[in-house]
Image (spheres, rainbow, N blue to C red):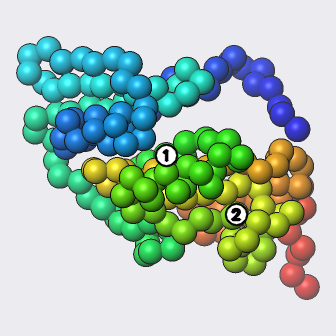
Amino acid sequence: MAETNSEFEFCGVNHLALVCKDMAKTVEFYRDILGMPLTKTIDLPGGRGQHFFFDIGNGDALAFFWFPNAPEAAPGVSAPAALPTRGSFVSAHGSMNHIAINVRAEKFDEYYQRLVDKGVEVTPILNHDNSPTQSSAEMNDDVYVRSVYFFDPDGVCLEFAAWTRALDERDIAHDPVRADGTKAEGMITGRAPVPAE
């Protein structure tokens, strides 16, 4: 079901840029705990801070700025205040809610245990499916992605995510919601609303 972009030939994500409070702790977490190679370090001119890049695979990078006078974090506004299953996962419009790092399905359980062994506080494994709760404690034929969530030292919410099957037309089944909370009926599904009698 892969559609192609007729406007631009994108090659994936070059990098996501976040802001950290302590670059040394950021390096310890991403390089030393998660094993991401550090690929570029920059001292910004004029004492304006630093910008470091970590390799997350497939030519993509996760980058961090350190600014000497950056405002403090605002959990629940600029990022979720809690991990999924542990409280509100809501963040503000325009915020980056979380970063999902793709991992191989056959390595997922091993990587989950590796996070636990390294002392990272993680959620239970979420096997996302199409059930009413949208998650199963056990693997089943309806699971399309497996997830575990955790925070970095600055409260950035990270996820290891493993696709378990190819997505297809059955996975595009919901019309989007407008800012006022109403659904844009028929925009995706092609099913127009039934008029009231």
Nearer to me, 162 or 3: 162
Quarter holding the C terminus is bottom right
Extreme-bottom residue of the structure: 197
Labelled disc at residue 99: 1
Name the spot of residue 46 as percent of width and height, x first: 8, 16
149 horizontally vs 139: left or right: left
User: Is residue 80 at least partly visible in the picture?
Assistant: no
- Residue visible at 51% across and 74% down? 85
Mark 2 or 1, nearer chain start: 1
Amino acid beneath label 1: Ile
Give the secondary structure at mark 1. strand
Quarter holding the N terminus is top right
Name the spot of residue 34 as percent of width and height, x first: 42, 41
Above or below — where is 70 with respect to 40? below
Give the secondary structure at mark 2. strand
Identify the image quadrant of residue 120. bottom left
Which residue corresponds to mark 2? 128
Marks 2 and 1 close (CB-CB < 8 Å): no
Name the spot of residue 144 as percent of width and height, x first: 77, 56
Above or below — where is 3 with respect to 78? above
* Mark 2 surroundings within 10 Å by alpha-carbon count, few (fewer than 14), some (14 through 19), many (20 or more): many
- Residue visible at 45% across and 59% down? 116
- Residue visible at 36% across and 58% down? 119
